[in-house]
Amino acid sequence: MLFPTLDFALFFLVVFAAAWALADRAAQRKAFLVAASYVFYGYWDWRFCLLLLASSLLNYTAGRLIDGTPDPRRRRLIVGLAVAANLAILGFFKYFGFFVASLNDLMFAVGLERELPFLEIILPVGISFFTFQGISYVVDVHRGHVRASRSLLDLLLYISFFPQLVAGPIVRASLFLPQIENRDGRSGPRPDRVLAATGLLLITVGLFKKVILANYLATEMVDEVFFDPYFYGSLDLVLAIWGYTLQIYCDFSAYSDIAIGVAALLGYRFQRNFDQPYRSQSVREFWRRWHISLSTWLRDYVYVPLGGNRAGPGKTQRNLMATMVLGGLWHGAAWNFVLWGALHGLAMVAEHRFGWDRPARAWWRQALAIVLVFHFVCLTFILFRAETMEIAGAYFAGFLRVDQPAEFLTPFIAGLLIIGLALHFIPRGTGDFVARGFARLPMPVQGAAVGVAILAIDAWGPDGVAPFIYFQF
């Protein structure tokens, strides 16, 4: 079920009305939201719901065992087994085919031509996101950052809550569970505390970024160029990779905006997941602004356990590389994602080694750093977008075809690129300022304004609704 569809609109209207009708009955409200979340997830394939339930039961049981075990060694054993079980589930569904294919290639290269059996495995939507939430939960219980939930219903809702279920943001239990704990027989959300104006604006902005910016950039240029980069000259290839860099931001941040907005309308608070990443002056800063819930997850559950920056420059650089390579592999079971992560790791190691991650003072140095980092991100996104390493190689080689005229240098494409870039340089606090002004309007006026905006977006957008890019991860 995709956000920018009539199906989701009808689904959410029912959920919104029922959830607030149950506002004074905590258990019934949570049970309803769990059921609604499973309906949402089962819309793709009902069998996925069994995996989601298994993941929830695994992490609920592990949390209770950790919380009830005083012996530190046994606690470490339980958390280790729980993390291993989560990773085994993720590895089987997401990486089995990749490792079998890679091992077959290796065996063929050394002269062992026996081919290992290959299984056709359907990748469950959003498995990386809810698996990482499960891992963060059991690790945080072990670390004492959050108490193990005694309510299975609470844990089911935490793992399955539909706004962020399939494409994030990755929500920490320490943020979400306190919002759904019972207080005097009532659940956390209160109608008078809901940031309705903020939620409505986030949903509207998200729809604009997805339906107008991301979809038009994809259909009018990016998909065509990446399908056959051999056919295009250097200027079209540059425009297309600028376009894809803005498309993936608009696409993924749109999902996060809508998810955060939908959760807000139901009374729950999520943290922001993007913070104008293309104005970054270093690759390290880029990762503090891009997919914040993943980058902080990798920091807290991979980089820090490896030793972080506590063991000297050499091991710090090793830990950075390992974290970024694993981050690349998280995005997809292919060598181009591994290389993409490794290049970001090398860039961060170089910044750390030479002090390039320190903020510049002169305005021209800041501008130069932003341009350089943006184009580094653009070039590495070629590996991210290309379906094979061969296509990526052809794309890079095409930059030498400077004699071909540009096909996509049109006012419409230029306008999309300018708007996409401009989103990164809007002054901080603009969104909050607009939300406060919007909140002062009467609710019927707010609803009418949002309704008109959504109808306009639907009318101006291209036909059909493309899936969000991060559904594949």
Image: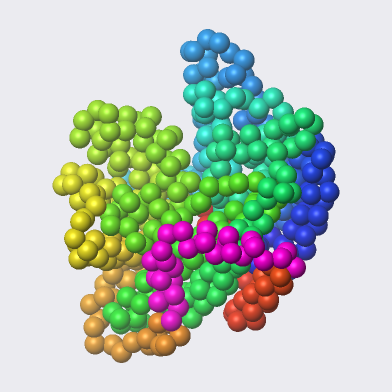
Q: Outermost residue toward the left?
A: 354
Q: In this orientation, which residue lies closer to the viewer: 114 or 101?
A: 101
Question: Is residue 419 a member of the stretch shown in magenta?
Answer: yes
295 w.r.t. 74: above or below: below
- Residue 309 drawn at (x, y percent): 28, 33
The magenta segment is 415-444
Q: In this orientation, which residue lies closer to the viewer: 47 or 438?
A: 438
User: Could you tell whether 346 is left or right of 166 in the image?
Assistant: left
Quadrant of the rendering where the N terminus is positioned: bottom right
Q: Residue at x 33, y 40 (%)?
A: 322
Q: Residue at x 51, y 73 (%)?
A: 213
Q: Is residue 243 something that shows in the picture?
A: yes
Q: In this orientation, which residue lies closer to the viewer: 169 or 315?
A: 169
Residue 245, quarter of the rendered image? bottom left
User: Could you tell whether 203 is left or right of 401 in the image?
Assistant: right
Q: Residue at x 32, y 29 (%)?
A: 307
- Residue 228 drawn at (x, y percent): 40, 77
Q: In this orientation, which residue lies closer to the viewer: 281 or 49?
A: 281
